[in-house]
Image (cartoon, helix red, strand yellow):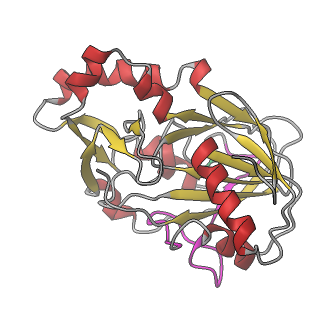
Amino acid sequence: MNYERIEICPLTPTLGAEVSGVDLSQPVDNATAEEIRRAFADYLVLFVRGQEISPDNQVAFAGLFGPVGTYPFAEPIDEHPQVIPIIKEPHQTTNFGGIWHTDTPYLEKPSLGSVLYAREVPAVGGDTIWASGYRAWETLSDGLRATLEPLRAVQSAAKNKAKLRTDHLKNGSMRGHNEGAMDVQQAEHPVARTHPVTGRKALYVSPAHTTHFVGWTEAESAPLLNYLFSHITREGNTCRFRWTKGAVAVWDNRCSLHYPLNDYHGHRREMHRVTIEGEWPV
Ligand code: SIN
């Protein structure tokens, strides 16, 4: 089906598309919102460049996809509890979320998606890469899919917490929130989850948060999980976005992973992120 209200330029055959023809500082009409949601289902991650938006505009855009939620482990910006800053200062050497992950899989109802807005970006570096959980699932052998199909995995906020968040929060402009809860927050979810809109199955494990298969030990799980982590992040399964100031991305956490590159030491990068509430994975 074609798009009539927006223009779409796919980034790769697998996932990712740039959208033009929208101004997110203004209310988005219903017909345009329908097309944006259709493109979101088709491409998993959408990018809109050149936007000048307020935190309220960003929350309104996120609201086109579902109820807007909060992120448990970082302080939001003043007067906008749904917007967290993601900032790397020139003196910092770690970045926030710098391991392949999907957002908040350790919650019983993990985030549906996230909206990231680039407020300040380095001249070069600081790109983000996304990977398709659909293609990862669909390119496994029938035999491995049959093995994985009934399995559930534990997703933990504690796994890699220093590298993902706490090391970065020290000495920077971001502030931690509920840090004690990171050690205990975890959930069990299907290894292959079915997307409620497309009906497609997506591999739902990540190096950042998946510790083991339910009923297996960590040592037993590790070889197969490591295989799945390298399978899902293979080059042909990804798209890479070079940020420009004012660019907005919205991605689907139910069927994709992402990885912010940390290759811009000495430069500042400031983003605002809004989290869209999700449903119980099945
Ligand atoms: C995130 O993991 O949500 C942040 C992504 C980025 O900074 O590019």
Q: Give 43 or 86, whichever is nearer the viewer.
A: 43
Q: Which quarter of the picture shows residue 25?
A: bottom right
Whether residue 44 is visible, yes or no, is: no
Magenta-drawn stretch contains 88: yes
Q: Is 224 placed above or below 162 here? A: above
In the image: residue 127, left or right of residue 193? right
Mark count: 0
Query: Is residue 224 at least partly visible in the picture?
Result: yes
Which residue does the image show at 63% across and 35% down from the upper left? Answer: 15
Determine the residue located farthest toward the left in the rendered image. 215
Let me know if residue 194 is in the magenta part. no
- The answer to which image quadrant residue 23 occupies is bottom right
- Residue placed farthest to the bottom in the image? 79
Relative image position of residue 211 (x, y in whole percent): 28, 36
Residue located farthest toward the front when viewing the structure as drawn: 1
Q: Which residues are magenta?
A: 68-92
Frontmost residue, 197 versus 268: 197
Query: Residue drawn 37% across and 62% down?
Result: 279
- Residue found at x 42% / y 40%: 200
Vertical side of 70 occupied by 209: above or below: above
> x%, y% of residue 134?
47, 34
In the image, 193 versus 91, the foreground residue is: 193
Identify the residue at image location x=17%, y=22%. 220
- Residue 246, position in %: x, y? 85, 58
State the image coordinates of residue 222 (x, y, percent, origin top left).
26, 23
Q: Nearer the viewer, residue 276 or 271?
A: 276
Main SS of the magenta segment? Answer: loop
